[in-house]
Amino acid sequence: MRVFVAGATGAIGRPLLPALQAAGHEPIAMTRYEQKAAALRVQGIEAVVCDAYDAARLARVVADARAEQIVHLLTDLPEDINMRRFERETASTGRLRRDGTRNLIAAAQAAGVDKIVAESIAFIYAPGGDRVKDEDAPLAIAELPFAAEPIAELERQVRDAGGIVLRYGWIYGPGTGFRRDGSWAASLRRRQLPIVGSGTGVFSFVHVDDAAAATVAALGRQGPATYNIVDDEPVPLSEWVLEYARAVGAPRPWRVPVWVARLAAGRHAAAMMSELRGASNARVKRELGWQPRYASWRNGFQTALG
């Protein structure tokens, strides 16, 4: 199958391209930068340069690709997000999730491509209720409208087009912020990633290679559908941050009250560390037969951070 990958040089796109080849597919990689496209071509991967906001060119590029499937991994986030500037730093990706998604779906439909798989996130469920959420739980529209509303719009567009939404958990491993020398490790070493309050925010992780494998598993499936792509062990901040600190050789994190975290890092960071909800992978395992190689972040942190 010829698979057009928009956002092919991002954290998930990089391992996805060889995973597609290994599964017998032909990836066509889209990036905004000629330098990145040239590097992909050296690896034997067909690559095109296009900006998702250029609707006319995007339509031509998708048509010329003769793809049978679209994978939408378009984001525009800095690796090291400053939570005090969270709203401003996520604005560009919010626009991309709305307008870029619209352009990509229109290009796919014009080219006769009726299958699309799109990236979303599994850590934007509304706080309250169960500590671990399935795909039917409401998103945090009221609490984080600037982040959740673009996500909800992306998902609506994709499902309306009969596509599949993959809500990836916190991605770790090579090429991500959660690697041995990534931004989260740097924050730990600077003592800027404390345990906030009781550390009850629940995180659901997924290794980047498992995220890529789940994307391959979703190809060709009938939608509309939504799946959480996470490992088997949702975990509170108070537990994983200690293990991550040990894995990257960082000092033991401090504990700080929630009000101190609000002052130091902003209310969004404080809320995430104390109120975040995890995600269940029961649906994707049942319906797509996907099993994470790294079933627990514990093993992944010890052996596969990169």
Image (cartoon, helix red, strand yellow):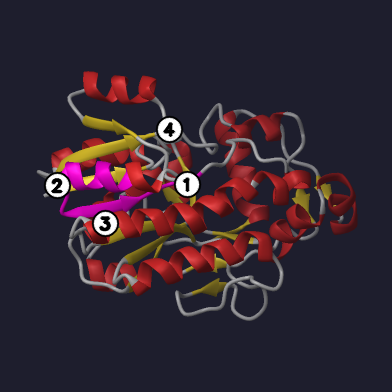
Image quadrant in which you'd find residue 148? bottom right
Looking at the picture, how far across and down is residue 273, in whole percent? 71, 56
> Which residue is at the front of the view, 280 or 34?
34
* For marks 4 and 3 on the same chain, the one whose residue lies earlier in the sequence: 3
Which amino acid is tagged 4?
A: Pro
Q: CA distance from mark 3 to mark 1?
A: 27 Å
* Dot label at residue 108: 3
Mark nearer the viewer, 4 or 3: 3
Looking at the picture, how far across and down is residue 63, in whole percent? 20, 47
Q: Is residue 185 above or below residue 41?
A: below
* Residue under label 4: 174
Secondary structure beneath label 1: strand
In the rendered view, does 115 fall on the left or right side of 232? Answer: left
Which amino acid is tagged 2?
A: Arg
Q: CA distance from mark 2 to mark 4?
A: 31 Å
Q: Is residue 109 above or below residue 20?
A: below
State which quarter of the image contains the C terminus.
Answer: top left
Q: Residue at x 21, y 64 (%)?
A: 114
* For marks 2 and 1 on the same chain, the one whose residue lies earlier in the sequence: 2
* Residue under label 2: 66
* Dot label at residue 171: 1
Secondary structure beneath label 4: loop
Does any portion of residue 282 appear in the rendered image?
A: no
Q: Residues within 10 Å of mark 1 (few under 14, many from 20)?
A: many
Mark nearer the viewer, 3 or 1: 3
Mark nearer the viewer, 2 or 4: 2
Q: CA distance from mark 4 to mark 1?
A: 10 Å
The range drawn in magenta is 58-75
> Which residue is at the front of the view, 242 or 277?
277
Q: Is residue 74 above or below residue 288?
A: above
> Which residue is at the front of the view, 276 or 188?
276
